[in-house]
Image (cartoon, grey):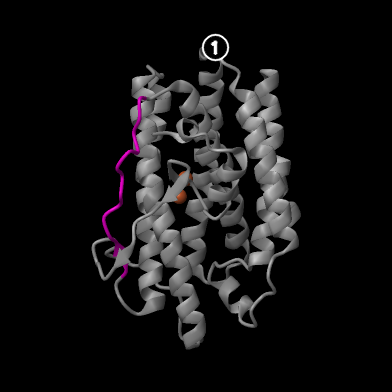
Amino acid sequence: MLLSQKNFEPKDVAESLLGAAGRPFLVNGVARRAEVGNHRDWILPRTPRPETAGLGAEARLILGEAWTRTGQLEHASVAAFARFTLELLAFGAPAELVARASAAMADETAHALSAFSLASVYAGRAIGPEPLPVADAVGACDLDEAIHTTFVEGCIGETVAALEASMARDHTSDRAVRAVLARIAEDEASHAELSFRFLQWALPRTATRPLERLTAVLDAAIERAAREADAAPAQPTIAEQLLAHGVLPEPRRSALRHSALRDVVAPCLHSLRDGHWQNRDLFGRLDSRAERVA
Ligand SMILES: [Fe+2]
Ligand SMILES: [Fe+2]
């Protein structure tokens, strides 16, 4: 069952989305992810080795948890792209979109591997995903619902993820972590662009007017992000240490999320509505936004 079949309101979507990072795997309006366990099979053979010698127990614990959460979200993104690929085939989408969606699954798998590998180093034990619950994830492949889900998962989720990763990359002094974040930032920007490209292809093919619904979803997300930016908690005393290993302080993340929605996603949605969206609309705004919030 998909989002609208349960009459999810825009505020519900905003709530489920903003707790996530990257492309969430939404089922019935809720972002799903796998639990984690003591597994070695999601750790890279040549694990990225961050420099942990100067880190205390508290910093290692927080970094292990933060990178585990990133691994869970990246792992869930694989499922989101698997479903998206099936939907593209069901809609008769062009090969260009199908090829990019299946390539994105490989990207997300690589992101999850890197994140679980880093998490395992910081935690000092093997961490990997348990089985992912996928029941009810694929419905009747309705184009309006796919437009809505792609906007929420891809246009919003991956735009925010691209900006977060590029900001974290620029503030990370650890070389191994920086390399992981550099790849994630580049890939998430490409995935966000793919999502807008899908909307550009799909919007003329539906008889309904989904743009009004997308605008309502975005407005609710912007409103919530603004509230969260105002109420962001104070930074812990070890925030600089965490930042050096790729974990952004919550106040910066909140401000960045708000900016990503207002200054990147909203103008791109306007361009789509006006019928002149181009990929440089997204990439140019991502670049200038990343510079301004750095
Ligand atoms: Fe990713
Ligand atoms: Fe992604």
Residue 273, above or below 29: above
State the image coordinates of residue 272 (x, y, percent, origin top left): 65, 24
Q: The C terminus is located in which quarter?
A: bottom right
Q: Which amino acid, mark 1? A: Ala
State the image coordinates of residue 62 (x, y, percent, origin top left): 49, 76
Q: The N terminus is located in which quarter?
A: top left
Q: Main secondary structure of the magenta part?
A: loop
Q: Nearer the viewer, residue 180 or 273?
A: 273
Give the residue at the far front of this rendering: 6
State the image coordinates of residue 159 (x, y, percent, origin top left): 59, 44
Seen at 47% across and 35% down, the residue is 6
Seen at 67% across and 58% down, the residue is 254
Seen at 31% across and 44% down, the residue is 134
Determine if the magenta segment contains residue 138.
Answer: yes
**Quadrant of residue 100 within the rendered picture:** top left
**Quadrant of residue 218 within the rendered picture:** top right
State the SS at label 1.
loop
Seen at 63% across and 38% down, the residue is 283
Determine if the magenta segment contains residue 61.
Answer: no
**Quadrant of residue 67 within the rendered picture:** bottom left
Image label count: 1
Q: Nearer the viewer, residue 39 or 111?
A: 39
State the image coordinates of residue 240 (x, y, percent, origin top left): 63, 77
Q: Which residues are magenta?
A: 127-140
Task: Read off the residue under disc 1.
Answer: 207
